[in-house]
Image: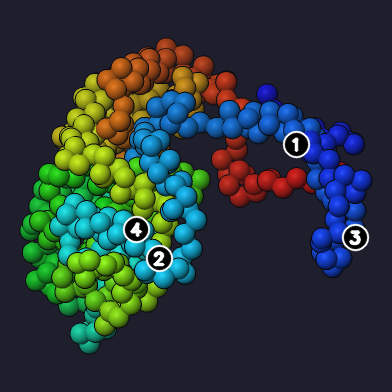
Amino acid sequence: MMTKLIFEKSKKNTNGINLTEENINFDFIDNRYIRTNKKTILPEISELEVMRHYKELSDKNFCIEKGFYPLGSCTMKYNPKVNEVLAGLEGFCELHPLQSDEDSQGALKLMYNLQEALKKITGMNAVTLQPAAGAHGELCGMMIVKKYFESIGENRKNVIIPDSAHGTNPASAAMCGFNIIEIKSNEKGLVDIDALKAVLDDNTAAIMLTNPNTLGLFEEEILEISKLVHEAGGLLYYDGANMNAIMGYTNPKLMGFDIVHMNLHKTFSTPHGGGGPGAGPVGVVENLKEFLPVPVVDSDGSKYYRKYDLKNSIGKMKAFYGNFSILVRAYAYILLMGKELKEASANAVLNANYMMNKLKEHYLLPYDRKCMHEFVLSGDWQKEQGVNTLGIAKRLMDSNFHPPTIYFPLIVHEAIMIEPTESESKEVLDDFINTMIEIANEVKATPDDVLKHPLNTPVRKVDETLAARKPDLAYKLQ
Ligand SMILES: *Cc1c(COP(=O)(O)O)cnc(C)c1O
């Protein structure tokens, strides 16, 4: 059912609060600031109706509080609400970013401790908390790569990226002026070592890798890869958006990486979606410490302070020092979990493997190997029977499941990328598995009926092309 716009619900002379001149003395406001044009374009509606209107809108939204959200590569997990409460504490919220270090010891200590925790988790030697998202962290990392080679007088132009990479990787490298060299994956879905050797030379600035990669597979040859890249004089960049695959088991340093970003809004307890806010801290090895954006938070053992004098700093990535409230949530989450961070990884991987093994009889599994936190099915079998992956995703919505990520990564036909995360119970996983099996059976029996879905969503099927190219989002006054 369509919801009316709040403007359409407007009824003349209705209001929630009476701000007319008889009720309020405006004398204290300077005349310059009093509106002379009385025609404000605001809906006229009562307080109760305003509340109902927005509640109705929010009810249309799908969220983790409403149902399972297996959106691959996005880590849509449950984030403990206590972290929201902590991020909302007055001492954090009311602190002004320009207040002195002396006045901000608590906040600086929190940032310092978070940097230390992220150093432990990644194995890196220094961390900046500034970048506001994963892609922003990648940009920061690529700027460091660029500045590093400038500082040693080399002009390396190429960044190598596997065809399974997240789309933001080539975009971030290209924004820094690097040429992107794509290398194909082998039949196991991993980096093809021969293809890598073929493109490595003294023009190689870096390789950007996600490990586990976007197929959810662990790069088994990672030590060989890092050796080859380092021998060619290049740096290794680790896309650690989904750290919950490996936390506590291994880390990017042990694999030979030089720079890593993490998504606090995926692994470390910040709800995300709709574009943020998030945080994408970047960690680096010892010899890249001086390239981090400023300020970094440091301590002399008793006091905490913002440090600006880094010799080769790339400058600033963001006003002040990042999205502070996201840092509070992440720090609270890490303290709450402690050593159980390792268990979170174990459960994320266990859940994904459990689902993958239950579903692989019913959906094509192109890379049939043990997966990490996610796995990628193909809808090819169903497509042959008349229902493509988009059809399966739309059908799932009518069973109160958010669809998985679809048509990504690009190297899998009709890709269905599923990430259950560590926070779901076996009952929820079984419900989803059974629904997916039910859908596979429906596709066999009555494919045309499957294609009629979704039937119960506020908006049914949209024209995918027009919706993206000609979105109609503005309210037009009659
Ligand atoms: C989510 C993700 C990103 C991008 O993170 P944003 O915060 O959305 O910019 C990069 N790489 C991988 C592997 C991701 O899953």
Q: How far apart are labels 4 and 2 at the CA level? A: 8 Å
Quarter of the rendering occupied by the N terminus:
top right
First of labels 3, 2 by sequence position: 3
On the image, numbered disc 4 is attached to which residue?
A: 106
Q: Amino acid at mark 2?
A: Asp
Residue sitting at 47 percent across and 22 percent down? 400
On the image, numbered disc 3 is attached to which residue?
A: 36
| Residue 88 vertical placement versus 415 (above, below) | below
Q: Amino acid at mark 1?
A: Ile
First of labels 1, 3 by sequence position: 1
Residue sitting at 57 percent across and 20 percent down? 455
Q: Badge 1 local density, few (<14 within 10 Å), some, or many (20+)?
A: some
On the image, numbered disc 2 is attached to which residue?
A: 103
Q: Nearer the viewer, mark 4 or mark 3?
A: 4
Could you tell me residue 170's position as x and y percent?
Answer: 35, 61
On the image, numbered disc 1 is attached to which residue?
A: 6
Q: Secondary structure at mark 4?
A: helix
Quarter of the rendering occupied by the C terminus:
top right
Could you tell me residue 137's position as x and y percent?
Answer: 34, 61
